[in-house]
Structure formats: structure tokens, C-alpha cells
Amino acid sequence: VNTGVSQSVYQLDTSGMQRLTANPQVLLPGQSLKLPGDRGTITFTGYVPWVSLAITHDPGQLPALICGIAALGGLLISFMIRRRRVFVRATGGIRDRAGEHGTTVQVGGLARTDASGGFEAEFAALAAELRSAHEQAGPHQPPAAHHQHEGE
Amino acid sequence: MPVNVALGHVSNAFLIAALVIYSLSVIAFAGDFAFGRPRRAAVARGQQAQDRAAALATVGAAGSTAGASGLPGAPEVPPVPGAAPVPGAPADGPVGGADSMPELAVPALRAIREAGRWVLAALALSSAGVLAHTAAVITRGLAVHRAPWGNMYEFVTALTCVAAIFFLFAMIRYRAWTLGVFVMGAVVVTLGLAETLIYTAAGELVPALQSYWLDIHVTAMTLATGIFFVAAVLGFVYLWVDRYAKRVTAGRAVPGNGIIRRLPSIEQIDRLTYRTIVFGFPVWTFGVIAGAIWADQAWGRYWGWDPVETWAFITWVLYAAFLHARATAGWRGRRAHYIQLLGFTSLIFNILVVQVFIAGLHSYAGVS
């Protein structure tokens, strides 16, 4: 034991030991067993109940738990919320080629998080909706759509 | 309560049945490539390209009149950059946008019927396989009176079940049955390997695992691994299609590969992979946190850099890197998928190498 080589408490290192043939026998405390070939006796002297305890104190536990839950919540929110902006600008008093005054409607879109895609289609649908609303309102030239799509 | 051995045998029979049915579904998926209806796909593509061209014409024309003015506060960019051809996209494929999944307009059942007899057969077989697989997992759980993912063999059968259920759902939701041959094929191989190499009969758990935290922590890890499994297969398909498109551009391959032509476009595969990982990532995060809480109860500290804890964290970092890479110029596409596959590699390394061969507190694999 005191050679410096570490040994497991739970496993016996049997190298360098010799196996004896003896009748296995249940021993109660105080009983002994004679070993064959006059090698002496083994006596079960008794046992001491023991328990192994590891006591830790970590004041950082609760903050770590709260931060972990907050991180998970933030993660879910960041995945569920899609940030995108749409700008609509109507400019009046512009003379077109035919010499008529009209209003130019510009539509711009900016997707901040569009990793799963779909903003372009959404923007096109919005522009189409504006256009059809305009066509219902009056027989003017269609509004101009300007699509600005920036990466995430 | 003793282990119900008879029910354990029922579970094994269900699992073998699932394996056979899955194999048949893979054959049916492959049969669709060989004998299915390529015409419909081509017609849909053509229609889609026309729609796209029409949309581009109107938006482009408007952009040329209004593009110069820009918008206040918004940085100047060339008009309609989002519609510019994406480098590496197949020349005959559609480009970008959610409208690149036009089939979504058609109800799922009709879309399946229109996809032809092979797809119908493959989906029916996949569903039957999933039912048998789920029955196998449930009967195993009833036989051993606990969550049936307490050792390596049970974990693999459960995670492939998650992968199959998840992919069946995604396949129908996104009409992506042409990807079925890859994912279901991978499920068949994994399940077959588990069955032949690491089969463990229904049995009791080591006392350290007999906790309700097994139901929370390991369930989350199983779910996430099953989902990441699907993402990894899709990542390989992505890299294959991407490589082919690059070779076509370089003139080193003939365009119109019979299989790739019928797969969803590379953007659709990319987006499906992304959605899969976005679904799996919070589950993995939750699993790691739940594991930390269990570790605190069982070992007196919530994080001790145990090998398995460390590798779960490395996996988490890699998948987080994938999510960031997709939003970083120069890292999206191919490179992002490399990161994703690296994440899955570290996950597999954790399961196969760290838990089995490296001594730590997590040595419960039951493989010897």
C-alpha cells in the first residue's frame, strides 16, 4: 500500500498473489478459518460502518441556473422572432415622361434575420398587395417597387 | 419490478420488423428515382422558373427607376440583390425565396398521390416502419419499467426512432420525399449496426441511472441526437449537390444528373437542414442544462469537466457556430455545413469513443 502506486479501493490487484484452494465459508465476526498447508488462519475481527461524503458549497449555483434558463429562453425567442422592416414612401409632384404629375410609391424591405428564408416572397406579396390596392383606387400608373434586401 | 422478458422479445420482434419495413421503403424510394415520374418534377420546375422570371421582370423594372434614390437610413445596395443568382446554385434550379417550394400550395395528400406510385409506396412503408419502430421502443420501455434509453443499444434504437418520426413529418410537410432514400437509408444502416454489434437484452439499469432525471436529461439528448442525425444526412446531401454544381460550372461534369435533378434545390436542402438544426439546438441546450442539474444532485457539482460533459459542450459550440456561420458572409453554404457535420462528428465521438473508452462518470454505455 505504501509503495506509492495508487490502487482502487474497490478492486484488488491480484498480480503477485497466489490463489489458494480452500472451502469457501461464511464467517461471522469473531470466527476464523484455517488456511490449508499451515499457512495460518484468517479471522473476521469485525467491521465498521462508514460512509463517504463530499460536501460542497457553491454560491454560484443559483445564478448559473437562472442564467442557463434565461439563455435557453433567449435562444427560443431569437429563433421564433424574425426581424424585418418594410419601408413605404410616397413622393408627390414628380413629372413623368407623359408630363403628368403623379405620386411615386417606393417600397423597401430589410431583413435582419432571415436565416430560414421567406422574406423575399413575403415582400413580393406585400408589394403586390399595395399594387392591387392602388389599381382598385384609381387608374394610375403602377407604383414602383424597390426591393432592398440585406443579408442577416 | 422484474424485467418482463416476454415483452422484451416482443420488442425485439417489432424492431426486426421495423428494420425490414424500412429497408423496403428505401428500395421504394430508390425505385422512384429509377422508375418514378420525372416529368412532373420537370413541369413544376419549368412553371416555377416562369413565375420567377415574371416576378423578376416587374421588380427589376421598378428597381431601375427607383433604385438610385435609396431609402433614408438604409444602406445603398444594388437593386434586387436577393434575386441575383446564388453562386454554386445548379444552373437549371430555381433561385432563393420561400416560393422555391411551390408544391406547398398543393395539399399534402394530393401532392403524394401526384408524386406517383413509388413515392406512395415508400411513404406508406416508412410510416409502417415508424409504427413498428415506435412499438418496439414502447414495448421495451414497458418490459423494463423505465424510459427505454438507459444504455447504448437502447439509446441508438430510440434516437433512430426520433430521426425516422421527425423526417417522416418533415418529408411530408416540405414534400421532400426525394431525400427519403438518404435519410431512411442512414436509419436502416444505423439500426442494423446497433442490432448486430451492440445488442443488449432488456435488463435493469445500474443504480446510478435509476432517477427521474434519466427521463428528463437522456430524453432530451435522445431527441436532439435524432434530430441532428437527420440534419447530418441532409448536410452530406447538400455537400454532394454543391460539389456537383461546382463541377458542372467548371465544366468537369455533365449537367442533368438523374438523381440530383429530382432532388429539392440546393437552397431548399440548405433551409431544411437549417430548420432541422434550429429545432434540435434548443433541445440539446435543454438537455445539457438538465444534465448539469442532475450532475449537481448526483455528484455534488453541476459542471465538473467530466469528459462527456466537455464533449456535449463542444458539440453545442459547434452547432452554435453553424447557426452563426449561416448568418456570416463567407461562411454560409458549404462551410456552414462542414461545421454542422463537425458538430455531429463530435456528438458521435462522444457516444462511441468517450462514453465507452474514456473513464469518466458517464460510463453507462453497457457495451463491453
Image: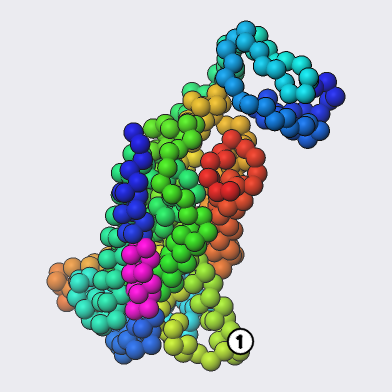
Tell me what residue is drawn at x 72 percent, y 15 percent: A41
Residue pointed to by mark 1:
B250
Picture coordinates of residue B184 (x, y %)? 40, 68
* Image position of B352 (left or right of A138): right
Picture coordinates of residue B233 (x, y %)? 48, 66
Tell me what residue is drawn at x 50 percent, y 90 percent: B255
* Image position of B75 (left or right of B124): right
Judge by depth and name the residue closer to the eye, B265 or B228.
Answer: B228
- Name the secondary structure under disc 1: loop
Magenta highlight range? B16-29
**Quadrant of residue A85 within the rendered picture:** bottom left
Secondary structure mainly formed by the magenta segment: helix
Judge by depth and name the residue closer to the eye, B364 or A81.
Answer: B364
Picture coordinates of residue B45 (x, y %)? 34, 84
Tell me what residue is drawn at x 35 percent, y 74 percent: B24
Near mark 1 (Cα within 10 A), the count class, few <14, some 14-19 or many ≥20, is few
Instruction: Please indicate, yes or no, whether residue A140 appears anywhere in the rendered image.
Output: no
**Quadrant of residue B135 within the rendered picture:** bottom left
Picture coordinates of residue B118 (x, y %)? 29, 81
Judge by depth and name the residue closer to the eye, A45 or B154.
Answer: A45
Report the chain holding disc 1.
B
Q: Give the amino acid at mark 1.
A: Ala
